[in-house]
Image: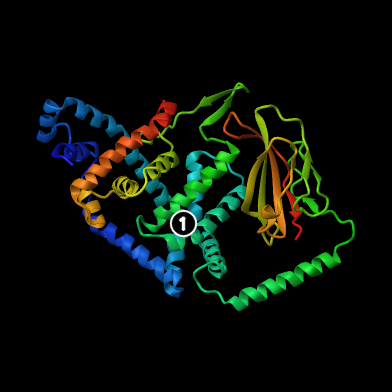
Amino acid sequence: MTRDDELLASYVAGELGDDSAEIRELRARRPEALAAAADLSTVARELDAGGALERRLIVAARAQASASDRERVASAFERSSRAPSSRFGVSRWLVAAALVLSAAGAALYFQRRAPGEREVQVLNRDRDAQIVLRTPQAPLTAGVALEWNAPALAASERFSLEFRALDAGGSPGKLLRRLRCTSASWTPSTADLSDWPEQVSLVIARVELESGGRELALSQPFSLRVAR
Amino acid sequence: MTSRPSEETTQADAHAADRSLVQRALAREPRAVDELVARLACTPAMLRVLQRQLGARLRPDELTDIEQNILGALWGKLAGYEGRAALETWAFRFVQLELHKALDRRRRSARLTLVDGERLEVVPCAEPGAPQIEPATLRACVERLGSPTCEIVSMRHYDELSFEEIARQRGEALSAVKARYYRGLERLKALLEPHLRRQL
């Protein structure tokens, strides 16, 4: 790097001003280089403003953190540290025991299911976008089409499907898959469903491609059972 | 820009201390876990503050959903924390990313207001000195510079370190740091060009 480049970097970063002797001398000798550097000062000012805003928001957040925030952060940490993929070395026996219990619970659940009971539940009936899940009324199964009724798509529109895991309280949690379809049907493959939990939520949206995927209509969230 | 304060060394040491705190928490030292949780307890508040700043009107259930994703991602990536920024700054990036992902999905920009039932009008940002470019977009463009330029630019503008301090921390010559910074800004300008035009 030349001495000039160092001076230009200091100028852009605001360490040397227009009135400094080095910059005055550089301007006289290489006006085009200094003009380009002045242009970059706009970027540096944006970065300064962005950095300052970020610091202000963090300070404000620190001041507003509540005891309940702390509790939720702590319990998320606990959950994460108990996860088998974490570095905390959770006993394999504990994981195996949990799996056995889950399997037993699942078996009991299906044994007690009334015959003909629907496998799809509507989680929020307030939302209505005229998108209604038609099939499956049986569990979501690899190779079996998932179909829904909805007004016809315009050429610039697509259906967007978002699958999430359902947590113990029945609320949608971790995002599993998001995909777009040109028709009101999607058939999952075995690979698609291989690592999905037993219950998932699905929201179908009608999106507009030209506006970067703007959602025009959202279905009610559906809860679906995944076949094993 | 003003010259950097004498707390430079303190900032650098603070990041090293944060790295050590994370490592001790990962090793399940109870006091370290408590301290780490206390430090990151502001993460949910960051989400609330940022969504207010963006003017986003998210429902409580949507906020809960985003918060879950943030905390999941945060703890999931904890082992990858390298102490390049303060813990809170590191966490803030997760908040920013998850919130913008959610907002992108909803396409509910704070700066868009429906006028006459038809036309969308850009509502100018009222705060003087506020960035022209959406901070998350700016951050994303800085990250696209790649290592080590991204770190140098971040240390300079987000951590407010002087070039001398950056060179010392990275064990590089001052001239090399300045060269990378300058070239980085040239590339950043090109990356930001479309966003700057859109804002104007």
Q: Is residue A210 visible?
A: yes
Residue A13 pos. (x, y %): 24, 40
Q: Is A65 displayed left or right of A191 in the figure? A: left
Q: How many marks?
A: 1
Give x and y (percent) for residue B42. Answer: 46, 56
Q: Residue A78 versus residue B39: which sits nearer the camera?
A: A78
Q: Is residue A95 above or below residue B142?
A: below
Indicate left or right for B63 with A65 as reference.
right
**In the orientation shown, which residue stands out farthest toward the right?**
A115
Which of A82 and A70 lies nearest the eye of the viewer?
A82
Residue B33, percent from left and from top: 45, 70
What residue is shown at x 20% (from left), y 36% (from top)? Answer: A8
Q: Is residue B49 visible?
A: no
Split into 4 quadrants, where in the image is the N terminus of chain A? top left
Where is residue A200 shown, x and y percent of the image?
Answer: 70, 54
Above/below status of A169 relative to A30: below
Q: Is residue A72 left or right of residue A124?
A: left
Identify which residue is drawn at 81% across, 49% down.
A136
Q: Residue at x 42, y 47 (%)?
A: A57
**Residue B144 position (above or below residue B19):** above
> Can you identify the residue that label 1 sits on?
B42
Q: How is the image coloured?
A: rainbow
What secondary structure is marked by label 1?
loop
Q: Residues within 10 Å of mark 1 (few under 14, many from 20)?
A: many
Give the residue type at disc 1: Cys
Tell whether B68 sits left or right of B92. Answer: right
**Quadrant (top left/top right/bottom left/bottom right) for the C terminus of chain A:** bottom right
Pinpoint the chain carrying mark 1.
B
Residue A185, quarter of the rendered image: top right
